[in-house]
Amino acid sequence: MLVLYGKPTSINVRKVLWLCAELDLPLAHEPTPAPDLLATLNPNRQVPALRDGDFVLWESNSICRYLAARQGRDDLLPATAQGRAKVEQWMDWQATDLNSAWRHVFMARVRQHPDFADDARAEASLTHWNHLMTLLDAQLATTDGYVVGNTFTLADIVLGLSTQRWRSTPGNKPALPHVEAWFERLRPRPGFAKHVDNGVA
């Protein structure tokens, strides 16, 4: 049995939960692993972590890649080098550029963390985040419905969660019609209502 560790309010845990719903993959979920257990699973002491028998893996996007490959889902993660690279390109962009952009405004306006009380920095963070979301909008304008083409992939999972967070964070945002249309296309997906658009940012 696969075991996933991490609270379901974590955006990175929700990536894996949504993917498992897509895969119809049985999963034991332990939302609050003990600190000593978490330290043995991940030297960074962060979630999610996945256990598959004796095999342990951390980093949410790596876990998603592993599960898609484990289940032979070439539709979610193509087997061809170029097809896989296109999906992974957008997954890596989500994990680096997009995650870095939202940190200050999200922590200030959603988590209301006192260490992020500088509103000017929060506004600058939102401005940069908005800019990156316009890049996603431009990409979606060129495809046939999803991030890398006419097929739903892992790129849509990780960016779908990022988009839900963007939509949920207070502040002025540009109209992004292609992002909005794509987000509506994601709504019927298995697990979307439970793990993505569930009122949790």
Image (cartoon, rainbow, N blue to C red):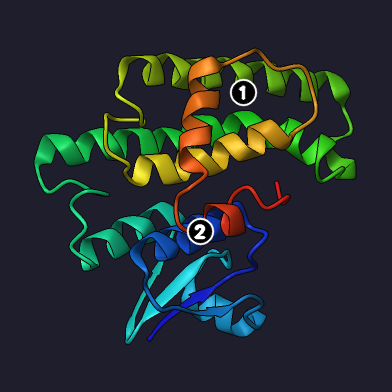
Locate the N terminus and report the quarter of the image it occupies.
bottom left
Q: Position of residue 180 (x, y in %)?
A: 55, 25
In terms of secondary structure, where does tag 2 sit?
Answer: loop
In terms of secondary structure, where does tag 1 sit?
Answer: helix
> Looking at the image, is 53 positioned above or below residue 41?
below
> Looking at the image, is 118 positioned above or below residue 54?
above
At a point 87% along the width and 27% down the height, the residue shown is 118
Q: Position of residue 174 (x, y in %)?
A: 65, 13
Q: Are marks 2 and 1 in contact (CB under 8 Å)?
A: no
Is residue 37 rendered to the left or right of residue 151?
right
Q: Nearer the viewer, residue 165 or 37?
A: 165
Three-letter amino acid code of the residue under disc 1: Trp
Is residue 30 rendered to the left or right of residue 64?
right
Badge 1: residue crowd in 10 Å (few <14, some 14–19, many ≥20)? many
At a point 50% along the width and 25% down the height, the residue shown is 181
At a point 37% along the width and 40% down the height, the residue shown is 155
Q: Earlier in the sequence, mark 2 or mark 1?
A: 1
Q: Quadrant of residue 89?
A: top left
The residue at which mark 1 appears reads as: 129
Residue 7 can be seen, yes or no: yes
Residue 95 can be seen, yes or no: no
> Looking at the image, is 55 positioned above or below residue 183?
below
The residue at which mark 2 appears reads as: 191
